[in-house]
Image (cartoon, rainbow, N blue to C red):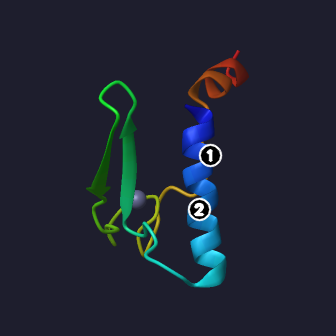
């Protein structure tokens, strides 16, 4: 499975570097090895109001709740 996906990622990199073909930009390729099927899923466009990756992000760093609780002891 890793070999199949790795080969597809390498092909995508070659297309990107050479500027040839169509990139998977904005979509994700899903492989179902049990059915031996590929499926291309379109990803939703970026939400400009997202608190993490939006235009004005409110969340700028990771927060570890467990560590925060321990520091209170
Ligand atoms: Zn986001």
Instruction: Answer above or below: position of 62 versus 28.
Output: above
Relative to residue 24, is residue 18 drawn left or right?
right
Decide: few, some or many residues near mark 1? Use Cα within 10 Å; few <14, some 14-19, many ≥20. Answer: few
* Quadrant containing ligand 1: bottom left
Which residue position is annotated with label 2?
11
Viewer-proximal residue among 13 and 26: 13
Which residue position is annotated with label 1?
6
At 61% from the left and 34% from the top, the residue drawn is 2
At 30% from the left and 54% from the top, the residue drawn is 40
Asked whether the residues under the numbered discs 2 and 1 touch, taking CB atoms below 8 Å apart as contact, a structural biologist would say no
Instruction: Give residue 16's quadrant in the image.
Output: bottom right
Q: At which x and y percent is residue 70?
A: 69, 18
Residue at the front extreme, as displayed? 36
Instruction: Answer above or below: position of 34 versus 62.
Output: above
Instruction: Give residue 1's quadrant in the image.
Output: top right
Q: At which x and y percent is residue 55?
A: 42, 75
Q: Is residue 63 visible?
A: no
Q: At which x and y percent is residue 71?
A: 72, 24
Residue at the top extreme, as displayed? 73
Q: CA distance from mark 2 to mark 1?
A: 9 Å
Q: Could you tell which of marks 2 and 1 lies nearer the N-terminus?
A: 1
Q: Is residue 49 visible?
A: yes
Relative to residue 63, is residue 24 drawn left or right?
left
Mark 2 element type: helix
Where's the C terminus, which quadrant? Answer: top right
Mark 1 element type: helix
């Amino acid at each position: 499975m890793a070999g199949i996906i790795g080969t597809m990622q390498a092909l995508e990199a070659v297309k990107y570097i050479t500027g040839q073909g169509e990139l998977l930009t904005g979509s994700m390729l899903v492989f179902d090895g049990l059915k031996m099927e590929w499926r291309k899923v379109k990803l939703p466009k970026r939400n400009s109001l997202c608190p993490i990756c939006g235009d004005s992000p409110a969340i700028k760093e990771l927060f570890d709740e467990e560590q925060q609780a321990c520091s209170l002891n």
